[in-house]
Image (tube, helix red, strand yellow):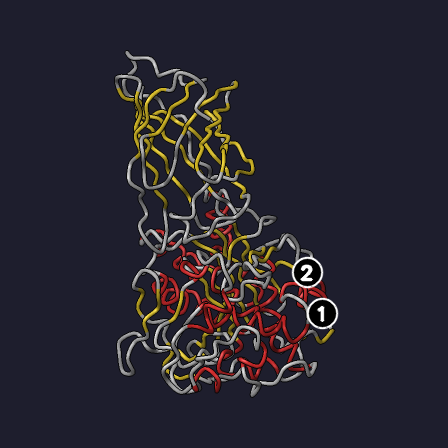
Amino acid sequence: MTSHDQSFRGAAPAEVGVHAGRIRRFLGELERRSLPLHSLLLYRSGRVVTEHYWWPYRADLPHMTHSATKSFTGTAVGFALAEGRLRLDAKVVSFFADQVPVTASEPLRAMTVGDLLTMRTGHRVGLSGKTWRLIDTSWVAEFLSAEVTDPPGRRFTYSSATSHVLSAVVQRATGQTVADYLRPRLFEPLGFAAHTWDTDPEGYSSGGNGLSLRSVDFLKWGVLHLHDGWWQGRRVLPEGWVARATREWVRGASSGSWDGSRFVPVEPGGAGIDRGYGYQLWLGPGDSYYASGMFGQDCVVLPRQDAVVALTAAIPRGRHQELSELVYELLVPAFDGPGPASDDRRLAEELAAAGEPPAVQPAVPTLDVPTLDVGGRAYRCDPNEDGLTGLRFDRAGDRLTVSLTDSRGTHRVHCGLGGWTESESTVTGWRLHHSYQPARQRVLAGARWSTPRTLILDWYFVESPFHDTVTVEFLPGERLRWSRSVNVNSGDTTRPAITAAAAPGPAV
């Protein structure tokens, strides 16, 4: 096994006591349950024994980590504490005197940085990034105006808003965004590359989600913690920080139930409470702990096994817990001892054959009717919930360019006909993408005819979990029906169909 990053040496699983057959069983069970991975990296005793990326995801591309971002925000707090720029007993309101409401409650005024760090703020419900990202005013002011009814420091309430305010606190204390603050302290020493970090309307790094990084850099963060903050003979994390961050500050923590916009805490004694919580970290069985993001972005540190597991995925909402359970049930035992060398070969062969790109131009079932020539066709959309006003299709050789016009402007997606085309696009997608709307995003796109008048567009947003499928039905009377869906989302995965009529001139 050869790692794609020079920070790590590769090894066959059996060389470092890893059972490749158990890795195969884990992957087989994921396939059986239709739980798709985008990448899987396994580290053991200084070596990477598995590093695989399923098409179309790649080693050089960053991937959204969603709520795993919280753990990096927590790391920034560790540096600020060690440098004397923060204290855990500092009152949150002291950092935002210009934004605290005059009617602020006593629980809000009593809330400390330590309460933020352990998600014990006194709030009864937690905000998801899905809701948070739609706020175009101050996210900090929104947090400070939310009702705080319970004394802080007691009840665990999972919330991306809490982590975001933690990021804002670090910036107020250090004068730098968390992204800039971590650059010389964490990202550069570990050799991170291609990572990005979203900001809020006020310029704070999004503390609860918004960090995208390469899978190998996700692994590095875990390996750094496994080695108590040491990296290649150099102390990177403050001494003692890992022990503090991974202490069980909360027992029986749960992200709660999801009501479409908020996390509602599970009552004590309720089902599903079996985890502890540290400083922006989940605690697993034994001495393990992990950073975790929606749709299956996890980095699991296993001190007893001297191992780290990093993975990215597109796990449907509500099934993320299945992935965590399978990691502990089937994958962690792989570190208990090697299997036969034949298992190493079979794993390597199976991974080499996995994830071949699908064909995008299958034969059209009805061959006696030619496929429609859509090149140069433009359409005006009927009124619709998505605000889409125009569509246009332009063909140049084996590339079909689809143009869409809405309130954000005109957006183009270049689609391969009989192949795949990778480009950057501004196309709107936040309703299907957990409210994420990057200014530009990398998309790998293909177009295929399923019938002579039905065009299927596959859009893989390869730096995220999202894969959109668009079905375009060209109807009699120069009309069309546009239907768009996505593989995973925190809400609906299908948008209402949009109809359109041929335009006499350019529609977009």
Would you say the residues marked 1 and 2 are in contact, meaning their CB atoms lie under 8 Å apart? yes
Is residue 225 visible to the viewer in this orientation of the structure? no
- Which residue is depicted at the point 47% across and 24% down? 400
Is residue 503 visible to the viewer in this orientation of the structure? yes
- Which residue is depicted at the point 59% across and 77% down? 95
Give the camera-side residue of 477 and 462.
477
Give the camera-side residue of 123 and 287.
123
Mark number, residue 279:
none
Q: Amino acid at mark 1?
A: Gln
Which quadrant: the N terminus? bottom right
Q: Amino acid at mark 2?
A: Ser
Graded by Cα atoms within 10 Å as few (under 14), some (14 to 19) or many (20 or more), the crowding at tag 1 reads few
Mark number, residue 232:
1
- Which residue is depicted at the point 51% across and 76% down? 100
State the separation of the CA atoms marked 1 and 2.
Answer: 9 Å
Q: Secondary structure at mark 2?
A: loop
Give left or right: position of 501 versus 80. left
Pinpoint residue 452: horizontal percent, then vertical percent. 31, 19
Q: Earlier in the sequence, mark 1 or mark 2?
A: 2
- Which residue is depicted at the point 58% across and 74% down? 169
> Which residue is under mark 2?
7
State whether residue 455 is above or below residue 72: above
Pinpoint residue 80: horizontal percent, then vertical percent. 65, 78
Q: Secondary structure at mark 1?
A: loop
State whether residue 288 is above or below residue 390: below
Q: How many marks?
A: 2
